[in-house]
Amino acid sequence: MTNEPEYRALPPAIQRAASIFHWVGWIGFWIQTVLAAISSILLLFAVPLLGATSQRGDNSGGFGLGLAALGLLALYFSIYWAFRYTRLAKRLQGSEETGRPTRGEAIRNLRIGLMVNLVGMLLALLAAEAILGVLFARSSQAQGMLFSTRGLVQAVQPLDISVVLANTHIIMSHYAGLVTSMFLLNRVTR
């Protein structure tokens, strides 16, 4: 006779939920991580160069860049939350004595993930509006290279397009987080 406790098989529904949380959590985590890394690098290169343009008198893109940075911060939290889905999967595979999460706890976690991604996407969309508004104004004024009271009006630069690309990656990443959370929420509430 051994002193080891008997292993009780998990119910099939919990096994499926744990497997889905594991795989979908990791997929969402890696998609968001890759897009966040690209966005971070693009924005890190943009900030010093945009600082140089603000010293020349054109600081109109700062508000949009600030909103994009806030969207990126929300994205970092969303990445952490996607990682938590994988930890939730491990807890689901545990025994009831070790603290297996309830269905209500799983739904609460998924709702937090949804809210974080919705707020992050809203920030990134507002950033896109601000950034593209500035770029539109620059491109329409730069046709004849108009002079302003501060000097030559800045034309659209490749750096400006990299900021738009970074912001687009932030939006796409939040969308991936939304899809991940909604898919898991759909599975849990069945």
Image (spheres, grey):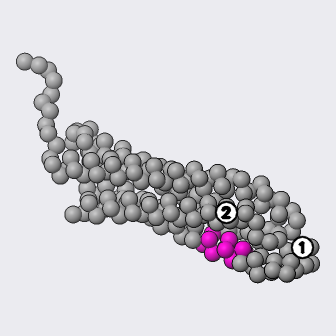
Residue at image point 32% right, 47% down: 22
State the separation of the CA atoms marked 2 and 1: 22 Å
Tag 1 or tag 2, which sits nearer the N-term? 1
Q: Secondary structure at mark 1?
A: strand
- Going by the picture, which residue comes out furthest to the front? 143
Q: Which residue is mark 1?
A: 152
Looking at the rendered structure, the kind of residue marked 2 is Val
Q: Secondary structure at mark 2?
A: helix
Q: Which mark is residue 163?
A: 2
Q: Quadrant of residue 135?
A: bottom right
In the picture, measured across the screen, residue 123 lies left or right of residue 90, that is right
Residue at image point 73% right, 68% down: 61
Residue 32 on the magenta span: no
- Going by the picture, which residue comes out furthest to the left? 1
Q: Which residues are magenta?
A: 126-135
Q: Position of residue 39 (x, y in %)?
A: 60, 56
Figure check: 81 above or below 91: below
In the picture, measured across the screen, residue 40 lies left or right of residue 63, that is left
Residue at image point 68% right, 71% down: 131
Q: Position of residue 143 (x, y in %)?
A: 81, 80
Looking at the rendered structure, the kind of residue marked 1 is Leu
Q: Nearer the viewer, residue 86 or 97?
A: 86
